[in-house]
Image (cartoon, rainbow, N blue to C red):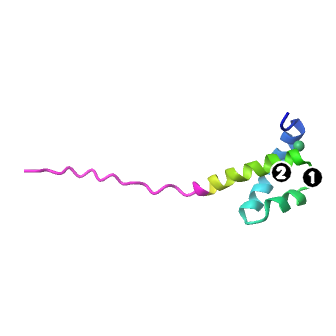
């Protein structure tokens, strides 16, 4: 089985800090070491979430709103 209840709990506890530090530019693997996540299964689970962070960052800014010009062109 991939992961375990232990992993789930560990990750829930560490995720916020992990995310914060990775977002601030730290090496994810180093952060895992600092957080004491030595088990490969836990590291892999958090590291797989890093890819999600990229997505979050990418979309953290509201997309430029396309102002739909609703000018009614009147052709005569
Ligand atoms: Zn684990």
- Give the residue at x 78% y 65%: 26
Question: SS class of the residue under badge 2?
Answer: helix
Please determine whether, in this image, residue 61 is positioned above or below residue 72.
below
Residue in the picture at 92% in, 55% down: 36
**Magenta residues?**
58-76
- Residue closest to the eye, 6 or 27: 27
- Which quadrant would residue 59 be assigned to in this image? bottom right
Q: Residue drawn at (69%, 52%), measured in percent from left and top?
A: 51
Which mark is drawn over residue 5? none
* Residue 14 - label: 2
Outermost residue, bottom direction? 25
Q: Is residue 37 left or right of residue 26?
A: right
The location of residue 27, given as percent across then percent down, is: 79, 64
User: Disc 2 or 1, which lies upstream in sequence?
Assistant: 2
Label 1 lies in ligand 1 vicinity (Cβ under 8 Å): no
**Relative image position of residue 56 (x, y in whole percent):** 63, 53
Front one among 72 and 39: 39
Which quarter of the rendered picture does the N terminus lie within? top right
The verdict on residue 13 being magenta is no
Instruction: Give x and y (percent) for residue 53.
Output: 68, 54
Crowd class of label 2 (few under 14; some 14 to 19; many from 20; radius 10 Å): some
Q: Position of residue 54 (x, y in %)?
A: 65, 56
Q: Which residue is mark 1?
A: 38
- Quadrant of the image where one finds ligand 1: top right
In the image, taking residue 69 as reference, residue 11 lies left or right, namely right
Most extreme residue toward the top, as rendered?
1
Label 1 element class:
loop
Crowding at mark 1 (Cα within 10 Å: few <14, some 14-19, many 20+)? few
Q: Is residue 73 above or below residue 34?
A: above
| Main SS category, magenta section | loop
Question: What is the distance, in whole Å, between disc 2 and disc 1 at their CAs?
Answer: 13 Å
């Amino acid at each position: 089985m991939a992961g375990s209840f232990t992993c789930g709990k560990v990750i829930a506890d560490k995720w916020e800090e992990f995310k914060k530090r990775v977002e601030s530019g730290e090496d994810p693997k180093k952060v895992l070491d600092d957080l004491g996540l030595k088990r490969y299964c836990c590291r892999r689970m958090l590291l797989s979430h890093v890819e999600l962070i990229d997505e979050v960052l990418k979309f953290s800014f509201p997309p430029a709103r396309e102002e739909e010009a609703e000018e009614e062109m009147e052709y005569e």
